[in-house]
Image (tube, rainbow, N blue to C red):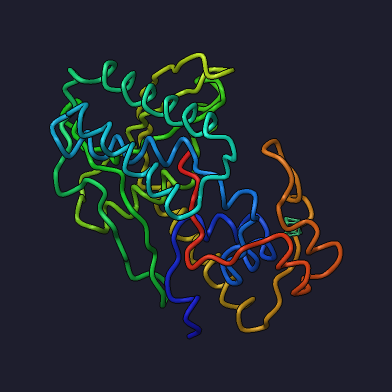
Protein backbone atom coordinates (compact mmCIF):
# COMPACT_ATOMS: atom_id res chain seq x y z
CA UNK A 1 0.00 0.00 0.00
CA UNK A 2 1.44 3.48 -0.83
CA UNK A 3 3.10 5.22 2.11
CA UNK A 4 0.71 8.16 2.31
CA UNK A 5 -2.19 5.73 2.70
CA UNK A 6 -0.81 4.09 5.83
CA UNK A 7 -1.95 6.66 8.42
CA UNK A 8 -4.83 9.08 8.65
CA UNK A 9 -5.64 11.67 11.26
CA UNK A 10 -8.99 13.37 11.49
CA UNK A 11 -7.86 16.45 9.53
CA UNK A 12 -6.94 14.22 6.58
CA UNK A 13 -10.34 12.53 6.60
CA UNK A 14 -11.99 15.91 6.88
CA UNK A 15 -9.98 17.26 3.95
CA UNK A 16 -10.91 14.28 1.77
CA UNK A 17 -14.58 14.60 2.67
CA UNK A 18 -14.48 18.30 1.85
CA UNK A 19 -13.01 17.64 -1.59
CA UNK A 20 -10.69 14.83 -2.80
CA UNK A 21 -8.79 17.37 -4.90
CA UNK A 22 -8.31 19.56 -1.81
CA UNK A 23 -6.97 16.49 0.04
CA UNK A 24 -4.53 15.83 -2.81
CA UNK A 25 -3.13 19.36 -2.65
CA UNK A 26 -3.08 19.64 1.14
CA UNK A 27 -2.02 16.14 2.26
CA UNK A 28 -0.40 14.38 -0.71
CA UNK A 29 1.51 17.32 -2.21
CA UNK A 30 1.50 19.03 1.24
CA UNK A 31 1.03 22.50 -0.22
CA UNK A 32 0.39 25.27 2.21
CA UNK A 33 -0.50 28.78 1.17
CA UNK A 34 2.44 31.10 1.79
CA UNK A 35 0.11 33.50 3.53
CA UNK A 36 -1.34 30.92 5.92
CA UNK A 37 1.99 29.17 6.44
CA UNK A 38 3.42 32.30 7.97
CA UNK A 39 0.66 32.90 10.48
CA UNK A 40 0.73 31.51 14.01
CA UNK A 41 -2.78 30.85 15.31
CA UNK A 42 -4.20 31.94 18.61
CA UNK A 43 -5.64 28.44 19.08
CA UNK A 44 -2.29 26.65 18.77
CA UNK A 45 -0.68 29.06 21.24
CA UNK A 46 -3.49 28.61 23.78
CA UNK A 47 -3.31 24.83 23.39
CA UNK A 48 0.34 24.85 24.39
CA UNK A 49 -0.26 27.17 27.34
CA UNK A 50 -3.18 25.08 28.62
CA UNK A 51 -1.21 21.85 28.17
CA UNK A 52 1.58 23.15 30.41
CA UNK A 53 -1.00 24.52 32.86
CA UNK A 54 -2.66 21.11 33.22
CA UNK A 55 0.58 19.13 33.41
CA UNK A 56 1.85 21.36 36.20
CA UNK A 57 -1.02 21.54 38.66
CA UNK A 58 -2.80 24.53 37.08
CA UNK A 59 0.31 26.68 37.39
CA UNK A 60 0.01 30.11 35.78
CA UNK A 61 3.78 30.43 35.50
CA UNK A 62 4.06 27.17 33.53
CA UNK A 63 1.18 28.25 31.28
CA UNK A 64 2.86 31.59 30.55
CA UNK A 65 6.17 29.83 29.88
CA UNK A 66 4.38 27.48 27.47
CA UNK A 67 2.87 30.42 25.58
CA UNK A 68 6.22 32.21 25.37
CA UNK A 69 7.97 29.02 24.24
CA UNK A 70 5.66 28.33 21.31
CA UNK A 71 5.67 31.97 20.23
CA UNK A 72 9.46 31.87 20.25
CA UNK A 73 9.35 28.72 18.11
CA UNK A 74 7.05 30.42 15.63
CA UNK A 75 9.51 33.28 15.27
CA UNK A 76 12.56 30.98 14.98
CA UNK A 77 10.85 28.81 12.35
CA UNK A 78 9.98 31.89 10.36
CA UNK A 79 6.28 31.42 11.02
CA UNK A 80 5.70 34.99 12.04
CA UNK A 81 4.43 37.10 9.15
CA UNK A 82 4.45 40.25 11.21
CA UNK A 83 6.69 42.80 9.61
CA UNK A 84 6.06 45.31 12.35
CA UNK A 85 7.53 44.50 15.83
CA UNK A 86 4.48 46.24 17.30
CA UNK A 87 2.25 43.57 15.72
CA UNK A 88 4.33 40.78 17.27
CA UNK A 89 4.08 42.47 20.65
CA UNK A 90 0.34 42.97 20.27
CA UNK A 91 -0.24 39.29 19.36
CA UNK A 92 2.02 38.15 22.21
CA UNK A 93 0.17 40.32 24.72
CA UNK A 94 -3.18 39.07 23.42
CA UNK A 95 -2.06 35.44 23.93
CA UNK A 96 -0.67 36.17 27.41
CA UNK A 97 -3.89 37.91 28.36
CA UNK A 98 -5.83 34.90 27.06
CA UNK A 99 -3.93 32.37 29.17
CA UNK A 100 -4.10 34.63 32.22
CA UNK A 101 -7.88 35.01 31.93
CA UNK A 102 -8.24 31.25 31.37
CA UNK A 103 -6.23 30.61 34.54
CA UNK A 104 -8.33 33.04 36.58
CA UNK A 105 -11.50 31.42 35.29
CA UNK A 106 -10.56 27.82 36.05
CA UNK A 107 -7.76 27.74 38.62
CA UNK A 108 -10.14 26.40 41.28
CA UNK A 109 -12.23 24.02 39.18
CA UNK A 110 -12.63 20.43 40.39
CA UNK A 111 -12.35 18.51 37.14
CA UNK A 112 -9.92 15.63 37.51
CA UNK A 113 -7.64 15.03 34.52
CA UNK A 114 -6.22 11.52 34.13
CA UNK A 115 -2.41 11.95 33.77
CA UNK A 116 -2.11 9.07 31.26
CA UNK A 117 -4.69 10.79 29.07
CA UNK A 118 -3.01 14.19 28.72
CA UNK A 119 -1.80 14.97 25.18
CA UNK A 120 -1.69 11.28 24.26
CA UNK A 121 -0.89 10.26 20.69
CA UNK A 122 -2.85 7.30 19.40
CA UNK A 123 -2.29 5.12 16.34
CA UNK A 124 -5.05 2.55 15.97
CA UNK A 125 -5.30 -0.18 13.31
CA UNK A 126 -8.19 0.65 11.03
CA UNK A 127 -9.29 -0.82 7.70
CA UNK A 128 -5.82 -2.16 6.65
CA UNK A 129 -4.42 1.19 7.73
CA UNK A 130 -4.23 3.37 10.86
CA UNK A 131 -6.30 6.09 12.43
CA UNK A 132 -4.02 8.53 14.24
CA UNK A 133 -4.41 11.60 16.39
CA UNK A 134 -3.77 13.20 19.75
CA UNK A 135 -6.17 13.48 22.67
CA UNK A 136 -6.09 16.84 24.47
CA UNK A 137 -6.98 14.93 27.62
CA UNK A 138 -9.26 12.51 29.40
CA UNK A 139 -11.09 13.81 32.42
CA UNK A 140 -13.55 12.78 35.12
CA UNK A 141 -16.63 14.91 35.62
CA UNK A 142 -19.71 13.96 37.64
CA UNK A 143 -18.07 10.54 38.19
CA UNK A 144 -18.06 9.87 34.45
CA UNK A 145 -15.12 9.76 32.05
CA UNK A 146 -14.92 12.17 29.10
CA UNK A 147 -12.56 13.01 26.27
CA UNK A 148 -11.41 16.56 26.89
CA UNK A 149 -11.42 18.87 23.85
CA UNK A 150 -10.13 22.42 24.11
CA UNK A 151 -11.28 24.86 21.42
CA UNK A 152 -10.98 28.53 20.61
CA UNK A 153 -13.46 30.26 18.34
CA UNK A 154 -14.53 33.61 17.01
CA UNK A 155 -18.19 32.51 16.77
CA UNK A 156 -20.73 33.21 19.45
CA UNK A 157 -20.78 30.55 22.16
CA UNK A 158 -24.36 29.48 21.34
CA UNK A 159 -23.61 29.04 17.67
CA UNK A 160 -20.36 27.20 18.30
CA UNK A 161 -21.92 24.74 20.74
CA UNK A 162 -24.77 24.13 18.33
CA UNK A 163 -22.28 23.41 15.53
CA UNK A 164 -20.39 20.97 17.73
CA UNK A 165 -23.42 18.81 18.58
CA UNK A 166 -22.77 16.41 15.71
CA UNK A 167 -19.10 17.25 15.19
CA UNK A 168 -17.33 14.34 13.52
CA UNK A 169 -14.02 14.85 15.25
CA UNK A 170 -15.62 14.61 18.69
CA UNK A 171 -17.27 11.32 17.72
CA UNK A 172 -14.01 10.05 16.22
CA UNK A 173 -12.05 10.86 19.36
CA UNK A 174 -14.51 9.12 21.66
CA UNK A 175 -14.28 6.07 19.38
CA UNK A 176 -10.46 6.33 19.50
CA UNK A 177 -10.29 6.84 23.28
CA UNK A 178 -12.32 3.67 23.85
CA UNK A 179 -10.08 1.67 21.48
CA UNK A 180 -6.99 3.16 23.17
CA UNK A 181 -8.03 1.76 26.54
CA UNK A 182 -10.35 4.35 28.06
CA UNK A 183 -13.25 1.96 27.60
CA UNK A 184 -15.73 3.82 29.81
CA UNK A 185 -15.55 7.19 28.01
CA UNK A 186 -19.07 8.60 27.69
CA UNK A 187 -18.50 11.46 25.29
CA UNK A 188 -16.68 14.77 25.04
CA UNK A 189 -16.12 17.49 27.58
CA UNK A 190 -15.85 20.68 25.53
CA UNK A 191 -13.81 23.55 26.93
CA UNK A 192 -14.36 26.56 24.69
CA UNK A 193 -12.63 29.91 24.74
CA UNK A 194 -14.64 32.49 22.78
CA UNK A 195 -12.73 35.45 21.36
CA UNK A 196 -14.74 38.62 21.62
CA UNK A 197 -14.80 41.08 18.69
CA UNK A 198 -11.95 43.56 18.35
CA UNK A 199 -9.87 41.64 20.91
CA UNK A 200 -11.89 43.05 23.79
CA UNK A 201 -11.56 39.91 25.94
CA UNK A 202 -12.83 36.36 26.17
CA UNK A 203 -15.85 34.33 27.19
CA UNK A 204 -15.43 30.85 28.66
CA UNK A 205 -17.94 28.07 28.06
CA UNK A 206 -17.93 24.39 28.97
CA UNK A 207 -20.36 21.69 27.94
CA UNK A 208 -20.61 17.93 27.55
CA UNK A 209 -21.48 16.04 24.38
CA UNK A 210 -22.52 12.46 25.26
CA UNK A 211 -22.01 9.96 22.43
CA UNK A 212 -24.19 6.89 21.91
CA UNK A 213 -22.92 3.46 20.90
CA UNK A 214 -25.05 3.83 17.78
CA UNK A 215 -23.23 7.06 16.83
CA UNK A 216 -19.83 5.41 17.29
CA UNK A 217 -20.83 2.40 15.16
CA UNK A 218 -22.12 4.69 12.42
CA UNK A 219 -18.92 6.75 12.50
CA UNK A 220 -16.82 3.59 12.15
CA UNK A 221 -18.91 2.35 9.26
CA UNK A 222 -18.85 5.68 7.40
CA UNK A 223 -15.12 6.11 7.98
CA UNK A 224 -14.29 2.66 6.63
CA UNK A 225 -16.12 3.61 3.47
CA UNK A 226 -14.14 6.87 3.35
CA UNK A 227 -10.85 4.96 3.64
CA UNK A 228 -11.92 2.74 0.75
CA UNK A 229 -12.66 5.79 -1.42
CA UNK A 230 -9.32 7.36 -0.52
CA UNK A 231 -7.53 4.16 -1.47
CA UNK A 232 -9.39 4.06 -4.78
CA UNK A 233 -8.34 7.65 -5.60
CA UNK A 234 -4.75 6.81 -4.73
CA UNK A 235 -4.78 3.73 -6.94
CA UNK A 236 -6.38 5.56 -9.87
CA UNK A 237 -4.33 8.74 -9.42
CA UNK A 238 -7.59 10.63 -9.78
CA UNK A 239 -8.75 13.17 -7.18
CA UNK A 240 -12.15 14.55 -8.23
CA UNK A 241 -13.16 18.14 -7.55
CA UNK A 242 -16.10 18.91 -5.28
CA UNK A 243 -17.17 22.34 -6.44
CA UNK A 244 -19.67 22.88 -3.63
CA UNK A 245 -16.68 23.16 -1.24
CA UNK A 246 -14.80 25.92 -3.06
CA UNK A 247 -16.01 28.61 -0.70
CA UNK A 248 -17.82 28.64 2.60
CA UNK A 249 -18.38 30.92 5.58
CA UNK A 250 -14.66 30.79 6.39
CA UNK A 251 -13.60 32.00 2.95
CA UNK A 252 -12.35 30.59 -0.33
CA UNK A 253 -10.35 27.43 -0.88
CA UNK A 254 -6.64 28.31 -1.08
CA UNK A 255 -6.21 25.96 -4.09
CA UNK A 256 -8.75 27.73 -6.29
CA UNK A 257 -6.17 28.99 -8.79
CA UNK A 258 -4.72 25.48 -9.18
CA UNK A 259 -8.18 24.22 -10.13
CA UNK A 260 -8.78 27.12 -12.49
CA UNK A 261 -5.45 27.28 -14.33
CA UNK A 262 -3.85 23.87 -13.64
CA UNK A 263 -1.34 22.84 -10.99
CA UNK A 264 1.82 23.92 -12.79
CA UNK A 265 5.13 24.07 -10.92
CA UNK A 266 5.31 27.79 -11.62
CA UNK A 267 1.93 28.48 -10.03
CA UNK A 268 2.61 26.15 -7.11
CA UNK A 269 5.95 27.80 -6.37
CA UNK A 270 4.41 31.26 -6.59
CA UNK A 271 1.64 30.62 -4.07
CA UNK A 272 2.64 27.72 -1.81
CA UNK A 273 5.33 26.19 0.35
CA UNK A 274 5.72 22.45 0.83
CA UNK A 275 5.74 21.35 4.45
CA UNK A 276 6.64 17.96 5.85
CA UNK A 277 3.52 18.10 7.97
CA UNK A 278 0.84 20.67 7.37
CA UNK A 279 0.14 22.41 10.65
CA UNK A 280 -3.44 22.27 11.81
CA UNK A 281 -5.37 25.21 13.08
CA UNK A 282 -6.40 24.36 16.63
CA UNK A 283 -9.21 26.86 16.67
S1 LIG B 1 -11.05 24.97 -5.36
FE1 LIG B 1 -12.84 23.66 -5.01
S2 LIG B 1 -12.51 21.88 -6.37
FE2 LIG B 1 -10.53 22.92 -6.13
S3 LIG B 1 -9.49 21.89 -4.43
FE3 LIG B 1 -10.60 23.64 -3.60
S4 LIG B 1 -12.57 22.84 -2.94
FE4 LIG B 1 -11.68 21.33 -4.36
Q: Residue at x 43, y 59 (%)?
A: 220
Q: Residue at x 47, y 35 (%)?
A: 42
In the picture, measured across the screen, residue 167 lies left or right of residue 274, that is left
Q: Quadrant of residue 27?
A: bottom right
Q: Residue at x 29, y 60 (%)?
A: 122
Position above or below: 232 against 250: below
Estimate the x, y position of residue 187 in percent, counting from the top left: 32, 39
Give the camera-side residue of 105 and 141: 105
Estimate the x, y position of residue 280 in percent, counting from the top left: 49, 51
Estimate the x, y position of residue 112 in percent, counting from the top left: 15, 31
In the picture, measured across the screen, residue 211 lies left or right of residue 271, that is left
User: Ligand 1 sits in which quadrant?
Assistant: bottom right
In the picture, measured across the screen, residue 93 lies left or right of residue 174, that is right
Give the camera-side residue of 254 and 137: 254
Q: Residue at x 50, y 55 (%)?
A: 11
Number of dots carrying numbers: 0
Position above or below: 190 against 244: above
Amino acid sequence: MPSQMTEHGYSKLNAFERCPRYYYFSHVLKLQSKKLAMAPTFGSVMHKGREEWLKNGRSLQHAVDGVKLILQQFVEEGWSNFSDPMEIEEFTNYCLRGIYEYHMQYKDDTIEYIPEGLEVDFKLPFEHSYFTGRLDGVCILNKMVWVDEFKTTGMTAARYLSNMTMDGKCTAYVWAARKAGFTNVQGVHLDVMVKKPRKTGFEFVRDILPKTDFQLEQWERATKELYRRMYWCEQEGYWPEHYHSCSNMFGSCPYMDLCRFGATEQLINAQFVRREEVKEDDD
